[in-house]
Image (cartoon, rainbow, N blue to C red):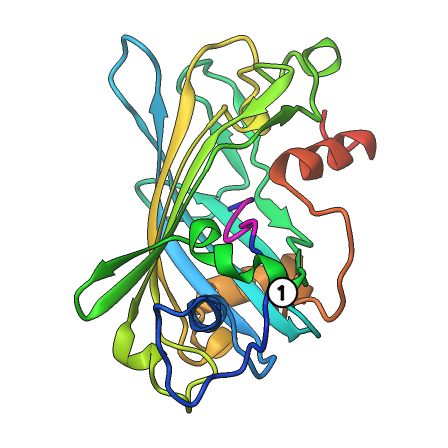
Amino acid sequence: MRYFLMIIMMGVCGLMMAADFDISKPQDHLNAFMRTRGDASGKDVVYYWTGTVYSFIPGEKRRELFKFEGFNVARTIVKESGFELLTREAAFFKDPITGEILESWKNPFTGAEVPVVQIWNDPVNQDLDFPAEYLPYIKMMLPASDLGDDLAFYMDIFPFYPSVLPRKEFSEFSQHDTYQAAEFFQFFVKKADLANKKLNTVPADISWTRISPWMPFMRMGDREGNLVFVTRGTKLTNGWADMPQHIKDYVEKHNPQYSKAPTEFTEPNETSWTYFRKLWEQGLIK
């Protein structure tokens, strides 16, 4: 999930809990999001999700193309007037019947057997150390819905920027010269947990939906249509220890560093499109 929790967040002024927590106060609102997304003590936080990937083509019925399973592991670094969020994430396309993580896939639209490029995004970092004068606007940048005993942070994101896979060079893999998508995140937390000053991180459930172009590995650059990712998940209580064993085994075999969050801030961030281009430049995409 490339933009899993990549939000434009504004400044921070005193991230530790006030004596009387009040979600209506900007500082406490930001603190609530920080403890929803990460851990104020700096410990790793792991979000895990599962879902389905569908085709969406004008004039055609949807097809269930993949089951989808992934995670994001993050570390919060408290700064003088804000914080950094250091993360990496991985997600895997799976056979919709067997649930097996795919190495290759027979494209039902073209009939071609293609290698599957899984999602390995490292890093997905955010520098959130902003001036304190932005704090009064934090609720505009990190909106939340009041659901009675619960609070739902939400982010509606519409990426729109020049594609790293321009059609002139990558017509087989890329539909457009512009990457355009839509991603919708929701984080559900209990107000009582947020008010508990002893909790550096709070239990949370999530949903994530994305509408995007075809993945480059599908080799459908000349075909119209989109993918729709529909997922739901949770923050793992015991972090990586609670990850399903088959995911642990796959990560250990292919990219063991993904079991932990990064330890320092680096740029630029990785996306599934930039990762694909790197593989292509290395001669690993035939």
In the displayed structure image, the side of residue 122 where residue 233 appears, left or right: left
Dot 1 amino acid type: Ala
Quadrant housing residue 146: bottom left
Place of residue 165 in the rendered image (x, y in percent of width and height, measured from the top left): 69, 22
Magenta-highlighted residues: 3-8
Q: How many marks?
A: 1
Place of residue 167 in the rendered image (x, y in percent of width and height, measured from the top left): 68, 12
Which one is in front, 235 or 11? 11
Residue under the image location 69 percent in, 54 percent down: 123
Quadrant housing residue 272: top right
- The residue tagged 1 is 132
Residue under the image location 46 percent in, 85 percent down: 18
In the displayed structure image, the side of residue 99 where residue 90 appears, left or right: right
- Position of the C terminus, as image quadrant, is top right
Which one is in front, 214 or 75? 75
Q: Say whether residue 30 is magenta.
A: no
Please tell me whether mark 1 sits on a helix, a strand or a loop: helix
Whether residue 217 can be seen here: yes
Residue under the image location 69 percent in, 39 percent down: 275
Please identify the dominant SS of the magenta region.
loop
Place of residue 63 in the rendered image (x, y in percent of width and height, measured from the top left): 30, 25
Crowding near the residue tagged with mark 1, few <14, some 14–19, many ≥20 C-alpha atoms within 10 Å: some
In the displayed structure image, the side of residue 283 where residue 8 appears, left or right: left
Residue found farthest to the left: 148
- Give the vertical position of 180 relative to 117 (above or below): above
Q: Say whether residue 7 is magenta.
A: yes
Place of residue 174 in the rendered image (x, y in percent of width and height, measured from the top left): 61, 18
Residue under the image location 49 percent in, 29 percent down: 181
- Give the vertical position of 175 relative to 121 (above or below): above
